[in-house]
Amino acid sequence: MASTLPDPHPGPRPTPLDGTTDGTTAYRDTGHTGHTGHTGGVEAHGIDHIPDSERRGRPGELFSVWAAANVNYLSLVVGGSLVLMGLTLWQALAVIVVGNLFWLLTGLLAVPGPVAGAPSEVVTRAMYGVRGNRVNNAVTGWLISVCYFALNLAAAATAAFALVDRAGLPVNTGVKAAVVVLVATVTLAISVYGHAAIVRLYLPVTLVLTAVFAAVGVVVLRHTDVGYVPERPLTGTALWATLPAGVALIASGPLSYTTSADFSRYLPRSTPARAVAGWTAFGGFVSSVLVCGLGACAATAVDMNDPESSLQPLLPGWFRPVFLLALVLGTVALNALTAYSAGLALQAVGLRIRRSLSVLVDGAVSVSLTLYALLVSDFLGTVGDVLQLTVLLLGPSTAVYATDILLRRNRYDGPALADESPAGPFWYTGGVNWSGALALGAGVAASALCVDTAYTGPVAAALGGVDLALPAGMAVASALYALLMRHVRDTA
């Protein structure tokens, strides 16, 4: 229903929607900061400020949003890959727990949502300025989201291909392309309908996925070698190089959700910050630990280079298609969040298009990348490279965001953040907050010096291949930002 509140942001208005009958005017979501409403069940808000009259929900709803999104095929693959890297089962499980502690940061980054009534893509204007934030959203927002969407879509498609094969259909290039498009269509439909659909759907999705993966867990644990040690156990420098690399691989999951305020911004302004952070972090942590742990346990019994095929012989025949459908469903739930945020990021870059259209644009790009990953490149290798390399950007980006929340004591003014004019409080110098830009740049540089993935940085080389990109990048970015923005702390 369109709101009748006066528009707090005077200026050019977006295009009126046709067909309003309640005597008010609804407006198209074009990425403009003017007021919007809801029409036809599709969320009409984009990156604009959410007025108090349209706030709803409870923080506990965030648990199912993040739990459903992390019971998926990719988590299973990543958990199993730790054992493939040469870790023992207990080492892998320890890495999974430590890496998933980064969900605490995801929870913290969700806290500004209710206060500002704005998505993360707008809140970060406080860190980088109006123009600087467009660049930030183009890279750490849109580009990385699209890459993750493609990887997750490839994971879902792999399970869907097995379903097609069980149905007796040929799994050729044409069929694979059709399956990818079908899964993407279902995913994008959820993203287009938006926030209310996500909150409504994800509780039953969480219950269904929990039941299926619990059954799979019982089977896998029966075959798990709890004392598993690889034929050539890692020792010395090799072990210390693998452990931080494994933590970074697991941490890339929660770090990819620097947009967690996107899903908390509809909560009432008075919602306790601890509840927002706690339910977000708890939902992501519990589901990720359990599914990644299941993948690690399975790797002691089967070849997790091809988990979909390797796990099926352990399952009863009638249950195998159920398992495959659950893998697809879990990845659809994950990707719907990713596509939703990618659509907001595209608006925040400065494109004046409605959110639903921006989501479809993201989907088209992601489908193209997915087809490349499945039909041309090596999927598992692609997963590892992308997840580890994104840490170069996501670690420092998360650190700057989290530091800003603490410096400002979560005091964000939504209407002020929505002001893109040179007279606005977040225009800074020429539209750029150089403190945030320099801190992020320094953090990325520190990560690049310490990384050991697709290439080896000089610091990693000097340490014998020990990858400290994640802690180094985050520490440098946070410390420099706190130093350069210390005046914010003094005035907050």
Image (spheres, helix red, strand yellow):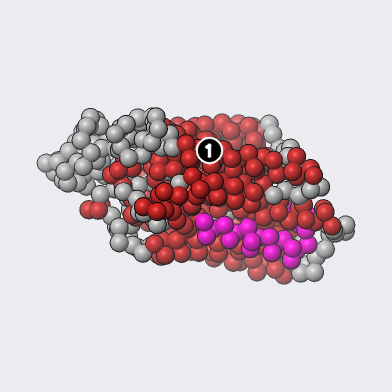
Amino acid residing under circle 1:
Leu
Q: Is residue 266 above or below residue 22?
A: below
Q: Is residue 383 left or right of residue 67?
A: right
Q: Position of residue 131 (x, y in %)?
A: 41, 32
Q: Position of residue 329 (x, y in %)?
A: 52, 52
**Left or right position of 58 against 231:** left
Magenta stretch: helix, strand or loop mostly: helix
The C terminus: image quadrant: bottom left
Name the residue rendered at 74%, 63% in the picture.
Answer: 91
Q: Is residue 312 visible?
A: no
Q: Say if residue 129 shows up in the picture.
A: yes
For disc 1, the neighbor class at 10 Å (few under 14, some 14 to 19, many from 20) is some
As drawn, which residue projects farthest toward the left? 23
User: For mark 1, what is the residue?
Assistant: 438
**Is residue 86 shown in magenta?**
yes
* Residue at the image position 23 percent from the left and 29 percent from the top: 12
Does 274 appear in magenta?
no
Q: Residue at x 30, y 37 (%)?
A: 424
Quarter-of-image position of residue 269: bottom left
Where residue 307 appears, as percent x and y from the top left, is 70, 52
**43 and 353: which is toward the camera:** 353
Q: Which residues are magenta?
A: 81-105
